[in-house]
Structure formats: structure tokens, C-alpha cells
Amino acid sequence: MRRSLAALTLLSVLTVAAASGQAAPTALPTVPTVQGGQLEVVHRFFGHMPVGVTLNSQGRVFVSYPTWEDKVPFSIAEIVDGREVPYPNVAINTMNPGLRASTFVGVQGLLVDGKDRLWVLDTGTINLGPVVSQDAAKLVGIDTRTNQVVKTIRFPANVVLPNTYLNDLRIDLRQGADGVAYIVDSGAKSGGGLIMVDLASGRSWRKLTGDATVLPTPQFVPYVEGQALFQRPRGGPATFLGFGADSLAISPDGATLYYAPTASRRLYAVPTAALRDETLSDAAVKAQVKDLGEKGAADGLAEDTLGRIYITNYEQSALTRRLPTGEFQTLARDPRLIWPDTLALHGGYLYVINNQLNRQGGYHFGQDLRVKPYTLMRLKVDAQPVILK
């Protein structure tokens, strides 16, 4: 008769206990798990590749498209009745070399704050190259109630460096006169780092430039779809991934910022008070950084009001959740999750962009292996987003 592993294990425990004279346990301890959820497709993308996603308080969905290998007819779209509509208008989405300060060049991160303003990170770069001009990199605020641009913040040369790549952001409206934005610079050639912006004045500053926690793990090799992933440009040679600190999450009280390089399996935390203190040296900030250990290889983080961190595990085609205790739960594994990217929580759902980033030509000697459509998916979860207002 075949016996399950659990039954055989229990039999072994009972035998050892009997031999030692100890009382036999009545049952094996159980490990708490989360039943894998059912992912549903919200939208299919048949055009250029999406990366970022966020929702406002009314459930309107906004998506970003970086200027990488694809032609990008628009950088920001709102999903309306199954269509991708350039947002907030066509003009700002039409890149104009003479109007780089007021049109989108290469958008990456985006986030809706507690005032329903959509904040858009324009990297000012094309295909992950250097910033094309100092005024091209910017943080643009759009009031989603009026669909009008309400603020544009540009960065000085000592904050956005020539090889800076503005990637992700979190906002705390309780700090300063109009809030503070925390932004991650994932450009390894710039040294990476964290950038803070006072939204009222537009003043910005950097911390942790060049620190090991914001840089790729040396010789990092992830396995995606069963294959080792290297940067393999047309003509070669193959090199290790150069993605630095990429995704961010923030604690429910706004006191802690979490960050993680994409080319890494580790998660780090730093007090936001240390980041906001412009007088504090990088060494003093570094002394307060905590290494929270491994979390898997990820390209997206999100947070909920219970202090749990949501993670896109691109090696496992999975969505996981880190508990405040440091334990992990697998929320879903699905073969359709081919490079799950940005996450967003809204209305009891976890949204995720699934964009096949690993299949781009830059990783296959110029051969584009992506198969459209890309997808926006969502998973029912017992969680609400952190909105600091």
C-alpha cells in the first residue's frame, strides 16, 4: 500500500518517540499557506510594451510605456472601455526634440497620490541610454479630476546625473507643505541611489549614491523561463544584468522605505526620516539601512495597510507576499506571468503588468522573442493600499 510523505513522516516520529520513551505527538505541525489565487486578465496590449500601472480613487487605470526597443506612439494611456487612450492628451505624449521639457521622452514609473494626482516619472532617456538633456528628466503631476497638468518638477545636474534612470516612486503627502516623493535611480552607471523631492518647492536631493545596496549584485544570473538571463546585445558580447535599485514600497506609517535592485534577490529598508534629512551624510544614512534578507528576484513591489510587501518573482512566474514577521506567502503561480513587472493595489485586487521583458532583443542578440499580447492581470487579495495623505 502506498503511503503519503506526511504519513511516513508521522510514522517515523511515532517510532522514535516510542523508542525514547517520550509521549508521541498527536499530529504534525502545519505550515500556514495561502491558496494560490486565480489571475484574471483585465486588458490585453497588442501594441508597444507596457511597464507601469496605477489606479486612482475612482478605479481609473493608467499605464506607462518606456521608450525602449519599441516605437512609442504615446507614453501614458488610460484604459477606457478596453482601449488605450493617450493621457492626459496627445500633445504631451508626442515627443518633440525641441520641447523635451514639456513633452514625454521616456516614461517609466507612475503613481496616484492621496489627492488623486497622477505623478509621472519621465526618465528623459531613450533605450536606457544617457539622459538626452537636463530638462528632459522630470516629475509631472496631473490632476485626474480635471485631466490637467498641475506641476512639472525638473532636477538639477547634481541630482539627475548623466546616466540616471528614474524608475519608481512613493509619495507621502503628510511631509512638508505638499508632500515628499521618494524616487529610485536604477542607473547602475550613475551609481544608482535614492532621490527625494519636496513637492511644494520642487527642491530635490540624493542619498546612497554608489552604495552596494542600490547596485546590481555582482555577476548576478537569474533564470527566467528556465534559461539563464544575460544582456546579449546584437553582436555581443554577453554581460551580466546591470539593473540597480528598481522598485519601492513604503510602510503604512510612512516611516520606512523598502527598495530592491532587480539584479538581486535581497530586500533593503531605510528610515524615511534619514532620507528627508538633507544634512545627513550618505555614511550616516547607510548606517541605518537594514538588509532584510532574500525575497526572490523581483521587478516590482507594492505595500498594504497591514505592513505586508507584495513582490513579483520573475524567476518563479509568481506573486508573493512578505509578512511583517519576515515569512513569505505565495499568492499565485501562473505560466502566463512572463516577467511580472509593476504592481498596484486597488479595491481588494492586486494588479500586475506582465510584459515579457526578458524576451526583448537586447537579451537575445537582437532577436525579439516577445509574443503579443502583453497583459494587465489582477488577483483578488485581502488587502488595501497604503495612501499617505
Image (spheres, grey):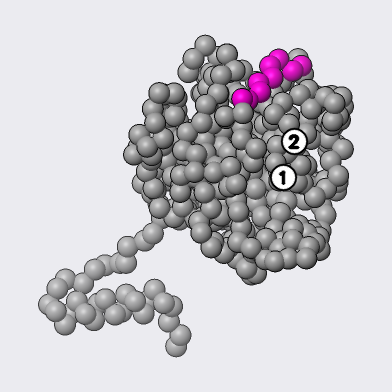
What x and y, as percent, mark residue 163? 64, 41
Q: Secondary structure at mark 2?
A: loop
**Front one among 122 and 282:** 282
Read off the magenta span.
148-156
Residue 79 makes an appearance in the image: no
User: Residue at (78%, 63%) from the top-left corner?
Assistant: 234
Q: Work out whether 6 lies above or below 270.
A: below
Q: Which residue is mark 2?
A: 132
**Closer-to-camera residue (29/383):** 383
> For this view, does 271 lie left or right of residue 188?
left
Q: Residue at x 61, y 28 (%)?
A: 157
Secondary structure category for the residue under label 1: loop
Kindly give the residue lying farthest to the left in the view shown.
21
Mark 2 residue crowding within 10 angstroms, few (<14) / some (14–19) / many (20+): some
- Residue 383: image location, x then y, percent: 52, 37
Amino acid type for the residue under numbered disc 2: Val
Badge 1 crowding class, 10 Å Cα cut-off, few under 14, some 14 to 19, many 20 or more, is some
Name the side, left or right, on which 371 lies relative to 129.
right
Side (left or right) of 95 relative to 293: right
Would you say the residues marked 1 and 2 are in contact, meaning their CB atoms lie under 8 Å apart? yes
Residue at left 14%, top 73%? 22
Tell me the kind of residue under disc 1: Gly
Q: Is residue 89 visible?
A: yes
Residue found at the very far top of the displayed protein: 177
Percent of width and height locating residue 203: 56, 19
Q: Is residue 196 magenta?
A: no
Q: Which mark, by number, is residue 158?
A: none
